[in-house]
Image: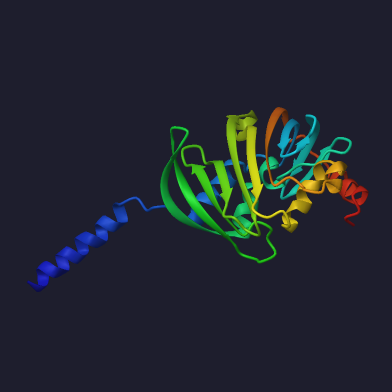
Amino acid sequence: MFKTKISHAVICAVAALWLPQQPTGDDILRRVEEQLAPVNDYTVDVQADVNMERLRIPKMKATMYFKKPDKVHFEAAGFAMLPREGVALNPAWFRQNFDATVVGRDTLNGLTVQKLQLAAKDRMVRLRQLFLWVNTERWTVEKFETIPYQGRSLTVTFHQARHEGGVFLPDTMNATFGFASEESDSLSAVYQYAPQMNEMQRPPRSGSMTVVYSNYRINTGLSDEMFEKKEKEDGKE
């Protein structure tokens, strides 16, 4: 009987070695980051169609520049974007700033995806908690949704396309956002859209935005000076 128990334990141990291990939340975020590892920088044309409650905003066009690890700026007069986390999607930002837990498999637009729950590592991170949906066949972020915080909610979905070097980058992003309270200081981020919003007696509490990306130029060797100059112009020295 003693030998039988030992044999059973050995069989279980060997079986555990052969069974595929389920990836952790950090494993999934790392694979998403690795999918974009070949991209050191890119330039892309973006067009944003913004719909805000009680406010009409014309379509906006800009050129967006991105360079690792987290340098971003937009080139267009008076152009402001919301949310930056979605427009300039940077998988490394999620892994650096959040602890990820696997919720389980989910279905999104007919795709089987992994749903993660992310909790901010630092209280200074603007988004405190969110859900993230990842396509584990190509390791792309398909959607993220914030858990309401300070009256604010945000849902962002992506349509990803393969680009130079076989990497996937968004060609369309759709965002919807809302505020439970008109007094939420989260609204200050929305005021960047247009100066007239600061003059409204009742600022908008909800809205949506669609961003279309086109003409990606990948790994052209963008200089750090380009981003440093932009920060000085914005008074962020």
Quarter of the image where one finds residue 170 = top right
Residue 61, horizontal then vertical, whole percent: 80, 30
Q: Which residue is painted at 87% across and 43% down in the image? A: 195
Residue at x-position 50% and y-position 37% = 138
Q: Is residue 181 left or right of residue 12?
A: right
- In this view, which residue lies farthest toward the bottom? 2
Above/below status of 75 relative to 68: above
Is residue 206 found left or right of 190 in the rendered image? left
Give me the residue at 62% from left, 31% from top. Answer: 165
Task: Please identify the residue farthest to the top as the structure is shown.
Answer: 215
Corner quadrant of residue 46: top right
Residues 37 and 85: in front is: 85
- Is residue 218 among the parts visible in the rendering? no
Taking the view exactly as shown, the residue that stands out farthest to the left is 1
Q: Return the x and y of residue 230 as percentages of the image width and height.
A: 88, 46
Residue at 62% in and 58% down: 149
The total of numbered circles placed on residues is 0
**Image position, residue 196 (x, y; %):** 86, 42
**Against 61, is 188 above or below?**
below
Quadrant of image for the C terminus:
bottom right
Location of the N terminus by quadrant is bottom left
Residue in the foreground of this view, choosing between 197 and 153: 197
